Amino acid sequence: MKAIYKKELRLFYTTMTGYVAAAMMLVLVGVCSHVVNLKGGLSGLEYALLSSRWALALVVPVLTMRSFVEEKKQHTDLLLSASPVTPAQIVLGKFFATATVYALPLAVVGFYPLIFSAYGSIDLPSALLALLAMLLLGLALIPIGMFISSLTESYVVATLVSIGAMMLMYFFTDIGSMASDSGTVALIVLTALVVGLVAVVYLLTRSSAAAVMTGAVLELACVVAYFISSAALTSLLRSLLSWLGLFSMSQNLFSGVLDIPAIVYYLSITGLFLFLCAGTLERRRWN
């Protein structure tokens, strides 16, 4: 795993990917900081980070697009499959390398409170919790991007699908609020989620029967719930989208509240998608 970590870390800075991602994050956070803190007169770093967290939907896909796509294009995935390194070690090596590249510009942002202190008082605990929120959010999004990368052989597809998925996660709470007034809208949104899940099941198993059966059972359950109680269906959708909304789960941390359930949630999402990545590699190895 250590060798994979060093190799991936070196590739980030020999291919300019690491520099581009760091520049994107620093520029976007800097712009939000200028608008919120300098122009708006607010001295708290948490306000700038809260306003710029959407930028992770652009930065993280840049970091993760090449995670497994490059291995497939260069056919080095065959060498990795034949090596004594386990899929879990491969995934963890790539994850820790990507997380390191992500954390470096975030460490630079950590010096912002020293600058802001010249313009007013700083609530250091709130600033540290906001930095923790950005770190946890990034660590949860990185395995998602890696997982998407493991399912395709195209940089463009991996990048666009990752950006689309992460932007959806950003707006999930708003979508849930819009759908809460109509059972029909809730059914449509749930159907779209079922279609997405069917696609993931097919990509993981390469079994049309398993994908179709999964989709049919879930869609039937949604339709039955719609006719029995549309209010229950909208309530289910709100709860589901709230759970899937990775960005909204960090609200308390950005507000200066140490939210232990949110921390556990982000670590759980990270572990889940790392497990899915390892499962994808294991299936490819046996195939």
Image: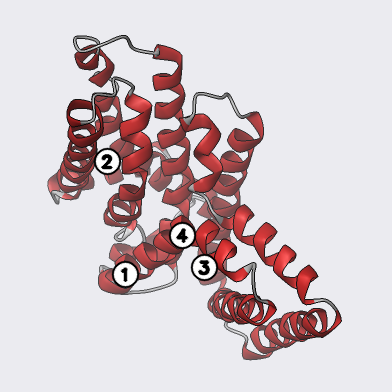
Quadrant in which the N terminus appears? top left
Residue 220: quadrant of the picture: bottom right
Q: Which amino acid type is marked by label 4?
A: Phe
Q: Looking at the image, is mark 1 or mark 4 nearer the viewer?
A: 4
Q: Looking at the image, is mark 2 or mark 4 nearer the viewer?
A: 4
Instruction: Check if mark 1's residue and mark 4's residue have beta carbons within 8 Å.
Output: no
Q: CA distance from mark 1 to mark 4?
A: 17 Å
- The residue nearer to you, when weighing 261 against 239, is 239
Residue under pointer 3: 285
Residue under pointer 4: 171
Q: Count neighbours of disc 4 (C-alpha within 10 A) and say few if under 14, some if 14 to 19, many if 20 or more.
A: some
- The residue nearer to you, when weighing 95 against 78, is 95
Q: Is residue 162 left or right of residue 11?
A: right
Q: Position of residue 286 (x, y in %)?
A: 57, 71
Q: Is residue 209 left or right of residue 23?
A: right
Mark 4, secondary structure of its residue:
helix
Q: Looking at the image, is mark 4 or mark 3 nearer the viewer?
A: 4
Q: Which amino acid type is marked by label 2?
A: Leu
Question: Tag 2 or tag 1, which sits nearer the N-term?
Answer: 2
Q: Which amino acid type is marked by label 3?
A: Arg
Question: Tag 4 or tag 1, which sits nearer the N-term?
Answer: 1
Residue under pointer 2: 9
Q: CA distance from mark 1 to mark 2?
A: 23 Å
From what the image shows, is residue 214 above or below residue 161? below
Q: Residue at x 64, y 67 (%)?
A: 180
Q: Count neighbours of disc 2 (C-alpha within 10 A) and say few if under 14, some if 14 to 19, many if 20 or more.
A: many
Residue 78: quadrant of the picture: bottom left
Residue 104: quadrant of the picture: top left
